[in-house]
């Protein structure tokens, strides 16, 4: 078994800077991650990928 586990993408809410795991869609061999539909904390629908968020941390 050489399959390496994949980390889910992380997204940062631009409203409150909460970090959310992306939602997975598709099958096990062609899945992808999408930003969450809505922030559970503040209701914002604006997210940026963690790696694209230069000010995080
Ligand atoms: Zn938020």
Image (cartoon, rainbow, N blue to C red):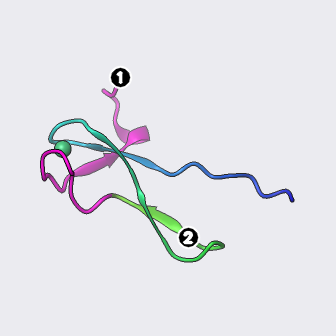
Q: Is mark 1 within 8 Å of ligand 1?
A: no
Quarter in which the C terminus is drawn? top left
**Left or right of 43 in this view: 54:** right
Reading the chain from its start, which is encountered first: label 2 or label 1?
Answer: 2
Q: Which residue is mark 2?
A: 31
Q: Which mark is residue 35?
A: none
The residue drawn where x is 25% and y is 63% is: 37
Residue 43 on image: x %, y %? 13, 53
Name the residue furthest right: 1
> Magenta stretch: residue 42 in it?
yes
Disc 1 target residue: 57
Placement of 25 over or under 52, stated as above or below: below
Question: In the rendering, at what x and y percent does residue 25 appear?
Answer: 47, 72
- Whether disc 2's CB lies below 8 Å from ligand 1 is answered no
Quarter of the displayed picture in which ligand 1 can be seen: top left
In this view, which residue lies farthest toward the front? 40
Q: Are marks 2 and 1 in contact (CB under 8 Å)?
A: no
Q: Crowding near pointer 2: few (<14 within 10 Å), some, many (20+)?
A: few
Tag 1 secondary structure = loop
Label 1: how many residues lie within 10 Å, few (<14), some (14-19) or many (20+)? Answer: few
Q: Magenta region's main secondary structure?
A: loop
Q: Which residues are magenta?
A: 36-57
Please tell me which residue is depicted at 74% across the width and 52% down the height of the picture.
4
Q: In the rendering, at what x and y percent does residue 12 appear? A: 30, 42
Distance from the alpha carbon under mark 2 to that under mark 1: 28 Å
Give coordinates of residue 13: x percent, y percent: 24, 44
Locate residue 3 relative to residue 51 in the image: left or right: right
Left or right: 10 in relation to 19:
right
């Amino acid at each position: 078994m050489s399959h390496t586990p994949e980390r889910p993408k992380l997204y940062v809410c631009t409203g409150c800077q909460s970090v959310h795991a992306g939602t997975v869609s598709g099958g096990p061999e062609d899945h992808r991650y999408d930003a969450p539909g809505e922030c559970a904390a503040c209701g914002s629908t604006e997210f940026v990928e963690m790696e694209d968020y230069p000010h995080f941390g």
